[in-house]
Amino acid sequence: MLKDLRERGSKLAILSNAPMKMMDGALKNAGITDCFDEVFSVDPVQTYKPHPDVYDLVTTHFRLYPEAISFQSSNRWDIAGATKYGMRTVWINRSQMPDEYADLSPSAVLKDLSGLPALG
């Protein structure tokens, strides 16, 4: 799925509340370090998602408006934060949980990541 998205020209990034040191180890252990164009940690802004400064890391780095970014997460609170920030969002609702943030609806809801390439 990641390969398919990259072949379509998508830039792939991770935006995490985890420290960069932890992210580096996790990506290396999973063998997916080379799958992403960028990995962002909250380290530089010293606050956590859903604070807008965290999402600013991505828009500033890629020099894009929020609506040009598709943001995916299985955490509904994170989808709500990115939606409020103005990003297009995809909630990966693996467990078919009820929507706790009806006022901040995601652009799409998928049960797993396999449907991402079809969203274009």
Image (cartoon, rainbow, N blue to C red):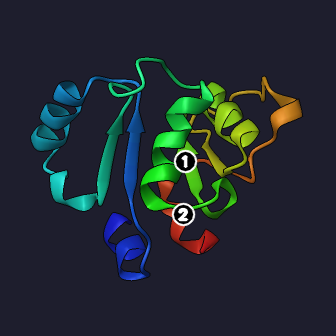
Locate residue 105 relative to residue 17 in the image: left or right: right
Residue contact between numbered discs 2 and 1, judged by CB atoms under 8 Å:
yes
Residue 22 picture quarter = top left
Q: Is residue 96 visible?
A: no
Residue at left 38%, top 66%? 1
Farthest top residue? 47
Which one is nearer the viewer's eye here, 26 or 1?
Answer: 26
For marks 2 and 1, the one nearer the N-term is 1
Q: Is residue 33 above or below residue 17?
A: below
Which one is nearer the viewer's eye here, 33 or 109?
Answer: 33
From the top left corner, tell me how far across and down residue 105 is, in percent.
Answer: 81, 41
Which one is nearer the viewer's eye here, 60 or 118?
Answer: 60
Q: CA distance from mark 2 to mark 1?
A: 9 Å
What residue does disc 2 label?
116
What residue does disc 1 label?
72
Residue 98 picture quarter = top right
Locate residue 70 relative to residue 1 in the image: left or right: right
Residue at left 59%, top 59%? 69
Which amino acid type is marked by label 2?
Leu
